C-alpha cells in the first residue's frame, strides 16, 4: 500500500466514524430529519423485497452502524473498495435527509445546509474514486476479459491438436 493510501483512507473514513457515533448518541434529531426520506424509501424497498424497519430511529441506528463498520474497514485497508462503495451508498440517503437546503426559509441556515450538502456530494465523489482504486493492479473487468481471451486461445490450440 502506498503512503498516500495509508494516510488518505483513514482521513476519508474519519468523518463517517465521528458522524455515525454522534448519530448513535442522539438518534432523535437525525430520525426526525430522516422521516420524510424514510417514509418514501421504506415502502419502495419493501416492494423490492428488502426488509427494512419503518421506525426512523432504528434506520438511523442501522445506518450509523453500517457507516462505522465500513469506515473502520476503509481506514484499516480491509476490503477498501467494498467499504468505500458501502459508505458512498449510505451517504446518499443521509445527505438527502439531513441537508435539505431547498426547504430552508432562513438564508443563513440554507447556506449552511447547502455547504454540507455539497460537502457530502464531494465525499461521495472521493468514495467513488476509492471504490474503483485497484492499487495499480488490473481490475476485475480486465482480468475477466484477459481470462476469456486466454480460454479462447487454448480452445483453438486444443481443437487444432484434436482435428487431423
Image: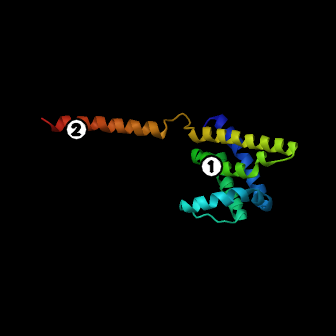
| Residue 146, label in figure | none
Q: Quadrant of the C terminus?
A: top left
Relative placement, left or right, of 29 versus 147 is: right
Describe the element under mark 2 as helix, strand or loop: helix
| Mark 1, other Cα within 10 Å: few <14 / some 14–19 / many ≥20 | some
Whether residue 78 can be seen here? no
Residue 1 in the image: state x and y as whole percent: 60, 38
Query: Which residue position holds label 1?
Result: 89
Relative placement, left or right, of 81 versus 151 is: right
Task: Identify the residue at image location x=69%, y=46%.
Answer: 13
Callout 1–callout 2 Cβ contact below 8 Å: no
Whether residue 23 can be seen here? yes
| Mark 2, other Cα within 10 Å: few <14 / some 14–19 / many ≥20 | few
Residue 55 in the image: state x and y as whole percent: 70, 66
Residue 84 in the image: state x and y as whole percent: 62, 45
Q: Specify the quadrant of the image occupied by residue 9.
A: top right
Please state the total of marks drawn on the protein image.
2
Q: Earlier in the sequence, mark 1 or mark 2?
A: 1
Nearer to us in this view, 77 or 33: 33
Task: Identify the residue at image location x=61%, y=50%.
Answer: 86
Describe the element under mark 1 as helix, strand or loop: helix
Task: Identify the residue at image location x=76%, y=48%.
Answer: 100
Relative placement, left or right, of 116 versus 46 is: right
Residue 126 in the image: state x and y as whole percent: 66, 38
| Residue 158, label in figure | 2
Colour treatment of the image: rainbow
Amino acid at each position: 500500500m502506498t503512503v498516500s493510501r495509508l494516510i488518505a483512507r483513514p482521513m476519508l473514513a474519519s468523518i463517517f466514524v465521528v458522524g455515525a457515533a454522534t448519530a448513535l448518541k442522539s438518534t432523535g434529531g437525525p430520525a426526525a430529519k430522516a422521516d420524510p426520506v424514510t417514509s418514501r424509501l421504506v415502502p419502495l424497498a419493501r416492494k423490492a423485497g428488502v426488509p427494512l424497519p419503518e421506525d426512523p430511529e432504528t434506520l438511523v441506528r442501522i445506518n450509523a452502524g453500517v457507516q462505522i463498520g465500513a469506515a473502520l474497514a476503509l481506514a484499516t485497508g480491509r476490503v477498501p473498495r467494498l467499504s468505500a462503495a458501502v459508505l458512498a451508498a449510505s451517504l446518499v440517503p443521509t445527505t438527502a435527509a439531513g441537508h435539505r437546503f431547498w426547504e430552508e426559509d432562513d438564508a443563513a441556515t440554507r447556506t449552511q445546509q447547502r455547504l454540507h450538502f455539497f460537502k457530502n456530494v464531494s465525499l461521495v465523489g472521493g468514495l467513488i474514486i476509492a471504490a474503483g482504486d485497484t492499487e495499480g493492479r488490473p481490475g476485475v473487468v480486465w482480468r475477466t476479459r484477459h481470462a476469456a481471451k486466454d480460454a479462447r486461445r487454448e480452445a483453438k490450440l486444443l481443437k487444432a491438436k484434436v482435428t487431423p
